[in-house]
Amino acid sequence: MLKQIILTAFISLSTITVSQCATQETSNNSHQQDTKSLVVYFSAQNHTKDIAEKIVELIGADIFRIEPATPYAANPYDDAVKIREEAYNGQRPAVKQLIDKEQMAKYDTIYIGTPVWWHQPAMVVLTFLESYDLTGKTVIPFVTYGESVWLNEVMQKIYQSTPDSKHLPTVLPEDIDPDDFINRQNDDEGISMPERPEQVAGWLKEIGVIQ
Ligand SMILES: Cc1cc2nc3c(=O)[nH]c(=O)nc-3n(C[C@H](O)[C@H](O)[C@H](O)COP(=O)(O)O)c2cc1C
């Protein structure tokens, strides 16, 4: 009985902590207040974070930063071999803390941000997405990168991890060889991504989120 009480207390406590995490960074100076949208992102060097925060500033959504259970090196290039291993083998590194499922169920739209890591999304982002039933929700990826060569590969992976969701953009360019994410394929044409925070408003207009 005592064990059950302690367990119940623990579950309630972690639930509160996680839901606060999902809302604590919500922008105060947003133009709108979109309580049905959540901006989730992983970022090692803050480029993706900057884009995520700009989206929040513009639409007033909640925000949540994905942290891996095992942190990467402060300079992620020091972990390049480990990260390549994760990407090339489709691994799913554990997430330090998830948003509780009831909180997630409240959102209609999930913006999901990731850097390109070895031609793939950061695998921890897929771990996060696959932890939920996102049926019927709209998933909108945003991706930062060094070279705009692997966007289609990254987007395709995110779409595959959320098969029952709607997506923006609705349709991706044809993935020339879905099994090949090593060689360049020139199949990114038509995918638009904001590279810098100043480009976020234009991008949101382009995908039809704001006018
Ligand atoms: C280990 C590692 C692998 C990367 N692989 C790619 C890649 O395959 N293609 C690419 O365009 N950029 C690649 N990059 C660059 C990142 O995508 C880019 O710097 C991104 O904006 C970083 O986002 P962040 O600051 O949010 O972590 C890589 C960076 C690291 C650290």
Image (cartoon, grey):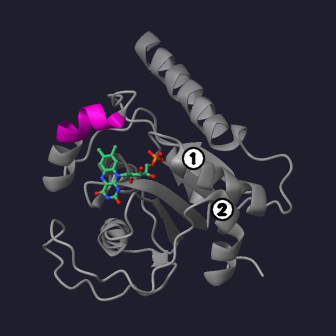
Quarter containing the C terminus: bottom right
Specify whether 120 is left or right of 46: left
Question: Ligand 1 closer than 8 Å to the CB at disc 1?
Answer: yes
Residue 205 in percent (x, y) is at 69, 79
Nearer the observer, 113 or 84: 84
Percent position of residue 109, x then y: 59, 67
Relative to residue 193, is residue 206 drawn left or right? right
**Which of the image's four quarters has the N terminus?**
top left
Q: Which residue is the site of mark 2?
A: 37
Q: Residue at the location (67% across, 50% down)?
A: 53
Residue for point 61% across, 81% down: 207
Q: Position of residue 191 (x, y in %)?
A: 45, 80
Q: Residue at x 62, y 61 (%)?
A: 107
Tell me the tag on residue 179: none
The residue to which callout 1 is attached is 49
Q: Is residue 102 visible?
A: no
Q: Amino acid at mark 1?
A: Lys
Write the start and end of the magenta stretch as one range. Answer: 76-82
Q: How many numbered tags mark residues here?
A: 2
Q: Is residue 78 magenta?
A: yes
Assign a secondary structure to mark 2: strand
* Residue 198 vertical position relative to residue 79 in the rendered view, above or below: below
Q: Which of the 4 image quadrants contains residue 90?
A: bottom left
Q: Quadrant of residue 157?
A: bottom left
| Residue 82 screen position, x and y as percent | 19, 38
C-alpha span from label 1 to label 2: 17 Å
**Left or right of 3 on screen, residue 210:** right
Residue 141 highlighted magenta (yes or no): no
What residue is shown at x 70% (from left), y 40% (from top)? 25
- The rendered magenta stretch, by its main secondary structure, is classed as helix
Q: Nearer the viewer, residue 6 or 196?
A: 196
Which amino acid type is marked by label 2? Ser
